[in-house]
Image: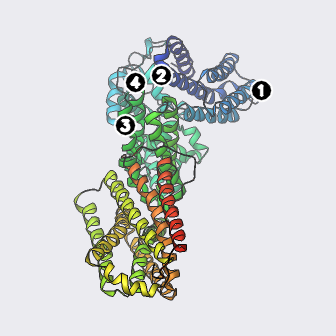
């Protein structure tokens, strides 16, 4: 069986299959099947056009007629797919491809147009292009000997015992000339569907896992052990090469010929040979978390298409908590915009799974897969890991520590103004105990049990909301006193009795919660970032951050000491009110990420510094806190005009 005959009959089979399937109950399956067929048509044009046209002249009329037919069919089939945002662009690309074929354009240009369009089709109308788990090539080898060797031969040379009696002859799978044009996904499709009119039958009775194992094994047949060995050396020594094929999806869709456009020809051959034989090597590029996230996202789509929306929702949440969240720290330090983009996309995806149409969910899932592929490239080992670890540690500590520092400094400055040194010890005890608790958390998370994503988000969420409520109350009280006048008299006569033991322990609790929520987040970030070889850069970043925070605390305390007491309370009231708004947004966002609260996305930018997240729930919570503070401040200002006694 020849390569062209294989594709020709496969196209016929797929066209016939699409014509037989119909009815509203199979709409999603029909869309996926048509999208796969279009992909196969385009892949055939990309691979075989060079055998039909060269230097603007037709080499073989029948082959050229097929190229025209397949290009036109792909365009027509695209027009029949459901409307999507990018459908118009796809049709323009299809029209350009058809025109290029009609003009007998050079094969390289046609191949690029066809590959670009097939990739765009797969993203707009998603369908699985890779196994959900790493294939086991030993199982693929066993299946090949049992199912395929009789025709294709034990070494895949097309010389099996039954080959002589077959017409057309079985494909020589070990022929490198043909193999360099084939992707693993194309092999998987042929194995799954068979080739009508030949002895090649489909293996639909096998599990998808087994068909992928067989496809990977067949994909190794054209390569010698020396090719694989050379590829192993290249993979280990060159970080840029590792980023070229960053995920299993990329490996299954990339042929050696396409890879040669990114690398040189010998490197493309060696790398293809090595990765097809050793797909587990991609674990170096694809952290366990992203692999879990991708698998859970794929499973959630499957569950939704099966009518299990509740199960799909749980899987979507698991994709974030069990998959993406473990790699958040490393990704945030290397590419924070990408981290924020993925986190926002995860939130939107969960909302779509809960209420959206299956086609919209499939589109969102595929876009998320693409973003996770980008994350794999960013997280791939590189020579700059030590610098990234230092900068990441420093950034994390400054970002997480600033809010806690502001709360503690505000309390200490307030007590200093009130001349209540006896209560200061409670505030110091609060943040010191919080640091100790953070150390215990680190030990537990590192050596005893893992802190789950849900536990982390719930802890941050509830502690943020508690701190927001307390700070809102403190801010309103401070503002009330800042407009009352005669502060020294008030402090002398009122504050001494107001700050009793109960209040002191309350300040201890506020200091503890404000610091521990940040320490908790920082500890988990550092535990996730800590790997062999980057310990000293992390510690250096931590030390630098501590020094900078200490200097900032000294500056804030000295500055507040110079302020007149009325201005101090006015500034402090504004500061704690702003912190309350910020923490309210972070608290609601944490509970959403833990799956405790529903998420309704809104098209606004995410601003972590202000606790702003793109959802109605977080925005309304912040607006409620802000409105409460503004009403209280307005009431205080109005009451000032009605004060009769100067002591308020």
Can residue 405 be seen in this snapshot?
yes
Q: Residue 147: give x, y in percent of width and height.
A: 35, 22
Element under disc 3? loop
Q: How far apart are marks 2 and 4 (CA)?
A: 35 Å
**Residue that badge 1 annotates:** 103
- Is 516 displayed left or right of 118 in the figure? left
In this rendering, which labeled residue sits more in front, label 4 or label 3? Answer: 3
In this rendering, which labeled residue sits more in front, label 2 or label 4? Answer: 2
Can residue 238 be seen in this snapshot?
no
**Residue that badge 4 annotates:** 153
Q: Residue 438: give x, y in percent of width and height.
A: 30, 68
Instruction: Tell me if label 2 and label 3 are in contact, CB under 8 Å.
Output: no
Element under disc 1? loop
Instruction: Tell me if label 2 and label 1 are in contact, CB under 8 Å.
Output: no
**Residue that badge 3 annotates:** 135
Q: Residue 277: give x, y in percent of width and height.
A: 41, 41
Residue at image coords 47%, 22%: 29
Q: Which of marks 4 and 3 is nearer the N terminus?
A: 3
**Residue that badge 2 annotates:** 29
């Amino acid at each position: 069986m020849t390569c062209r005959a294989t594709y020709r009959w496969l196209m016929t089979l797929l066209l016939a299959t699409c014509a037989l399937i119909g009815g509203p109950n199979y709409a999603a399956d029909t869309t996926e099947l048509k999208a796969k067929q279009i992909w196969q048509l385009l892949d055939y044009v990309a691979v075989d056009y060079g055998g039909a046209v060269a230097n603007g002249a037709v080499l073989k009329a029948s082959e050229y007629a097929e190229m025209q037919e397949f290009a036109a069919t792909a365009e027509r089939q695209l027009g029949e797919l459901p409307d999507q945002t990018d459908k118009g662009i796809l049709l323009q690309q299809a029209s350009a491809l058809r025109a290029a074929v009609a003009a007998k354009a050079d094969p390289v240009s046609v191949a690029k147009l066809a590959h670009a369009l097939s990739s765009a089709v797969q993203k707009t109308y998603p369908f699985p292009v890779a196994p959900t788990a790493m294939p086991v090539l030993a199982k693929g080898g066993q299946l090949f000997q049992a199912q395929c060797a009789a025709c294709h031969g034990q070494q895949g040379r097309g010389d099996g015992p039954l080959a002589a009696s077959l017409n057309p002859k079985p494909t020589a799978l070990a022929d490198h000339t043909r193999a360099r044009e084939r992707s693993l996904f194309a092999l998987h499709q042929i194995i799954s569907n068979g080739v009508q009119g030949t002895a090649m039958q489909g293996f639909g009775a096998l599990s998808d896992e087994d068909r992928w194992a067989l496809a990977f094994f067949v994909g190794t047949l054209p390569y010698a052990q020396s090719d694989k060995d050379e590829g192993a050396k290249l993979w280990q020594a060159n970080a840029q090469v590792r980023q070229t094929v960053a995920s299993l999806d990329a490996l299954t869709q990339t042929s050696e010929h396409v890879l040669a456009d990114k690398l040189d020809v010998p490197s493309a051959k060696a790398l293809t040979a090595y990765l097809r034989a050793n797909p587990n090597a991609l674990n170096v590029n694809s952290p366990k978390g992203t692999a879990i996230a991708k698998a859970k996202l794929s499973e959630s789509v499957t569950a939704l298409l099966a009518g299990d929306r509740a199960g799909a929702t749980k899987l979507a949440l698991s994709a974030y908590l069990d998959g993406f969240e473990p790699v958040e720290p490393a990704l945030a330090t290397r590419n924070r915009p990408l981290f924020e983009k993925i986190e926002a996309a995860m939130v939107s995806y969960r909302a779509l799974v809960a209420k959206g149409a299956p086609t919209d969910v499939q589109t969102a899932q595929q876009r998320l897969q693409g973003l996770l592929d980008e994350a794999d490239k960013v997280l791939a080992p590189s020579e700059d890991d030590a610098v990234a670890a230092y900068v990441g540690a420093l950034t994390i500590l400054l970002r997480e520590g600033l809010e806690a520092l502001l709360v503690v400094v505000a309390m200490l400055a307030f007590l200093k103004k009130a001349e209540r040194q006896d209560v200061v010890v409670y505030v110091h005890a609060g943040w010191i105990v919080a640091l100790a608790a953070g150390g215990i958390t680190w030990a537990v998370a590192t050596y005893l049990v893992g802190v789950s994503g849900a536990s982390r988000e719930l802890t941050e969420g509830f502690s943020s909301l508690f701190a927001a409520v307390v700070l809102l109350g403190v801010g309103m009280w401070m503002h009330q006193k800042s407009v009352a006048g005669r502060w020294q008299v008030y402090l002398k006569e009122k504050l001494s009795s107001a700050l009793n033991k109960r209040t002191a322990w309350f300040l201890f609790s506020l200091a503890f919660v404000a610091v521990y929520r940040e320490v908790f987040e920082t500890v988990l970030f550092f535990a996730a970032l800590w790997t062999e070889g980057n310990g000293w850069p992390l510690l250096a970043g931590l030390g630098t951050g501590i020094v900078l925070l200490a200097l900032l605390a000294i500056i804030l305390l000295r500055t507040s000491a110079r302020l007149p007491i009325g201005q101090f309370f006015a500034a402090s009231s504004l500061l704690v009110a702003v912190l309350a708004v910020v923490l309210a947004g972070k608290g609601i966002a944490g509970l959403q990420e833990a799956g405790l609260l529903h998420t309704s996305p809104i098209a606004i930018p995410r601003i972590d510094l202000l606790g702003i997240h793109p959802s109605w729930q977080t925005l309304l919570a912040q607006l409620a806190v802000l409105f409460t503070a503004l009403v209280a401040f307005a009431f205080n200002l109005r009451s000032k005009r009605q004060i009769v006694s100067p002591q308020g």
